Amino acid sequence: MLSREDFTPERIDALIAEARTHGPYEALTHEAREESRQTFLETATIPSEGLWVFGYGSLLWNPAFNFVACEPAKLEGFRRHFCLHLNMGRGSVDKPGIMLALDTGGHCDGCAFLIKPEDIDSETRILWMREMLSGAYHPHWGQIKLQEKMVHGLTFIVNKQHSRYVTDLTEEETLKRLEQGEGYLGTCREYLENTVDHLDEINVKDAYLHNLRDLLSSKNKD
């Protein structure tokens, strides 16, 4: 599990340095990451109640930032997709994995977290170090449907120009990545199972993820 203490510039530098001992690793500089964050904060019209952040994967079960409310939420126009090559965290050079991202098309059910106004600066620093380490995502400001209202909020969508973006994995290749992916944070299989378990808790059926989880379970029984 990740904690707030994991997200410091020094920790980020160490992770990138470790990744580069095994080969090229595309990553943002601290300056580029901070410029991205500042641009977002300057251009987004954040409501007086605070900043809503949409979570669809590990944020559901390991947010690692401070929030004051959490609600089931829906984001239109994007879907969960295992489309990011992973060779650190829950993958390695020897055991590469695959990670979820929000890809275009369809819709996504997840949760929205509310960061109170006075915490937006500190908590977005954590979010940018977490989500914008390599530049594989773009910060996206869009409409999020809560249970009783629509709000504007932040989420991170896949950067299709990034070297880690993969689009042509078959179901069997995706399952192989989920089975083998392992790193200092754990396994890709655990990542999938944790995400599905927390979707079950909020009564969300994601056919894509549930099917992958069931196929992995069946393969283990065989």
Image (spheres, rainbow, N blue to C red):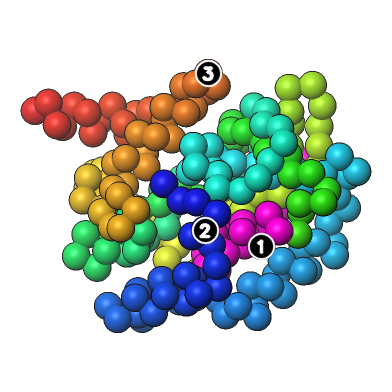
The reply to whether residue 190 is in sight is yes
Q: Secondary structure at mark 1?
A: helix
Q: Nearer the viewer, mark 3 or mark 1?
A: 1
Residue occupying image coordinates x 66% and y 62%: 125
Residue occupying image coordinates x 36% and y 59%: 89
Where residue 55 appears, as percent x and y from the top left, is 59, 41
In the rendered structure, the answer to whether residue 79 lies left or right of residue 34 reads left
Q: In terms of sequence position, does the residue under pointer 3 or pointer 2 come before the other?
A: 2
Q: In terms of sequence position, does the residue under pointer 2 or pointer 1 come before the other?
A: 2
Determine the residue located farthest toward the front in the rendered image: 5
Q: Nearer the viewer, mark 2 or mark 1?
A: 2
Q: Secondary structure at mark 3?
A: loop
Please tell me how crowded label 3 is: few (under 14), some (14-19), or many (20+) other residues with Cα within 10 Å.
Answer: few
- Three-letter amino acid code at the position of disc 2: Glu
Q: In terms of sequence position, does the residue under pointer 3 or pointer 1 come before the other?
A: 1
Q: CA distance from mark 3 to mark 1?
A: 31 Å
In the rendered structure, the answer to whether residue 64 lies left or right of residue 22 reads right
**Looking at this view, is 2 or 20 the one in front?**
2
Q: Which mark is residue 163?
A: none
In this picture, is 202 found above or below 65? Answer: above
In the picture, residue 143 is in which quadrant?
top right
Residue occupying image coordinates x 12% and y 26%: 221
- Three-letter amino acid code at the position of disc 1: Arg
Please tell me how crowded label 1 is: few (under 14), some (14-19), or many (20+) other residues with Cα within 10 Å.
Answer: some
Q: Which mark is residue 5?
A: 2
Tell me the residue that label 1 is attached to: 125
Magenta residues, start to end: 122-143
